[in-house]
Amino acid sequence: MTNESCLKKLRLINSAESLPLQIKILKMFIPEIEKKSLQEIKSYQEAQIPKLLEYLSKYSKYYQRLFKDYHIDIESIKTIEDLARIPVTTKDELQKNNTDFLCIDKHKVFDFVTTSGTLGEPVTFAMSDADVKRLGYNEFISFACATGCTQDIYQLMVTMDRRFMAGLAYYSGIRKLGAGIVRVGPGNPGLQFDTIERIEPTALITVPSFILKLIEYAEKNNIDYKNTSIKKAVCIGESLRNSDFSLNTLGQKIKEKWDIELYSTYASTEMGTAFTECSAGQGGHHHPEMIIVEFLDENNQPVKEGEPGEVTITTLGVEAMPLLRFKTGDICYHYTEPCPCGRTTMRLGPVIGRQKQMIKYKGTTLYPPALYDILNDIDGVENYIVEVYTNNIGTDGILIYVGTNEADEVFRKKIKDYFRTKLRVAPDIQFEKPEIIAKRQFPEMSRKPITFIDKR
Ligand SMILES: [Zn+2]
């Protein structure tokens, strides 16, 4: 089946033209549990809770201590609501007690990765052989959600090494999907286009802002990028949409230039699970076999649908480092009405910000992504770093380092006016050469660009 026919067949699901075909496709693409009622999904997940708690009380030093200190009778915890009686696990706890989270012998760990901790030092994360298989299954159903099929060839534009989980996850998922892969890694637009020409991949796996770099390179080098084999991109690390699911500035900029299908994903090392959009583009689908999700407010109380809440996860089926009520720090909206693709699972909106990065600026509450969205929309802003600090009156100040070749007062006023129009407030702007910003964005050890510095 070609990629086009995969897409076409998936779209038929919405059209009610051929019921037998629809059923066949649904069976092919969607795990059974993802088509059940929300109540059935809840019951399915609750059946996993006792197993998980027993496992943690047997093997996790950290949770053994937590259950003891808080007098948690694990046998009394049977529903997702009951979980609220167990204290949440924060990133700081994970960092301070890192090895106490490991539930298997070190010699049984197959793959070690690290994730950036909030207290500076990286956090070690470990996976057993079964965990890597679980990760592969997760990406398999995630790619399938984003119309992936055996005829696809994915160009992997994220790193496979550097103690990074994502590259390995995609690799394992594509293998399980039965599709093809070409591992180019990040950067190097010349090599990316050479690969596209040689291998004729159908899909890119990339940070979406890099697609803009590819387009820029293609335009400079007369590459007919619009007529390549690429039909879609699975995008990681940055949001493509606003909370109403319309494309944000980054998404629009890509689509205007290169009309490929864009699929947003949201994932993290700690949850070992991805939320990936289907072709309806209405949020990342929850895979109930992998993870229990709660949305909590600042006081760890559940928020209602339609209110922003911190994504708090409990992993299912993880052997080496399972997590219970782990607060990811990411603030999202969630939606529970069924999706046109046939899945009935909860959908996760784009990350509107990180709890710790919340900025109270001149009476307005902001998250950095809102600033990025505006900066991405201003021609002449090549790159940027947003710095937040405590000013001399004890409130938050924002200084934006803008990399540009048009450093003058007219441009500064243009940027400030644009911020005022969009957010009612204008942060301070400091101009730098784009090369200097680029250097600061990618320090030696970094795998992701640094666009936010918190000095508070
Ligand atoms: Zn869907």
Image (cartoon, rainbow, N blue to C red):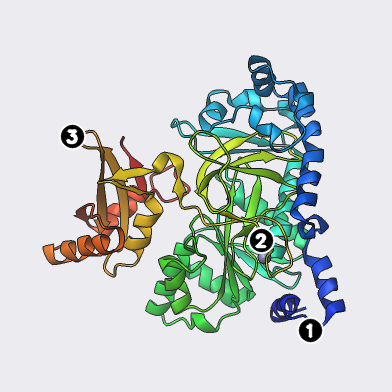
Q: Nearer the viewer, residue 413 or 204?
A: 413
What residue do we see at 77% from left, 56% from top? 37
Q: Is residue 215 above or below residue 417?
A: below
Q: Residue furthest left?
A: 409
- Per the model, the C-alpha gap separating discs 1 and 2 is 23 Å
Q: Which quarter holds ligand 1?
A: bottom right
Whether label 2 lies within 8 Å of ligand 1 gets the answer: no
Q: Nearer the viewer, residue 179 or 411?
A: 411
Mark 2 falls on what kind of element? loop
Q: Nearer the viewer, residue 438 or 415?
A: 415
Quadrant in the picture for residue 295: top right
Which residue has dot 1 on it?
Answer: 17
- Per the model, the C-alpha gap separating discs 1 and 3 is 65 Å
- Per the model, the C-alpha gap separating discs 2 and 3 is 47 Å
Q: Is residue 140 above or below residue 450?
A: below
Q: Contact (CB < 8 A) between labels 1 and 3?
A: no
Which residue has dot 3 on it?
Answer: 392
Tell me the kind of residue under disc 2.
Glu
Q: Give the image location of residue 213, x and y in percent.
A: 42, 67
Whether label 3 lies within 8 Å of ligand 1 gets the answer: no
Q: Give the image location of residue 240, x and y in percent.
A: 49, 63
Question: Within 10 Å of the Cα at label 1, are there few (<14), some (14-19), or many (20+) other Cα atoms?
Answer: few
What residue do we see at 29% from left, 67% from top? 378
Tell me the kind of residue under disc 1.
Glu
Which badge, 1 or 2, is on the more N-terminal residue? 1
What residue do we see at 43% from left, 76% from top? 218
Residue 82 visible (yes or no): yes
Front disc: 1 or 3: 1
Q: Mark number for residue 337?
A: 2
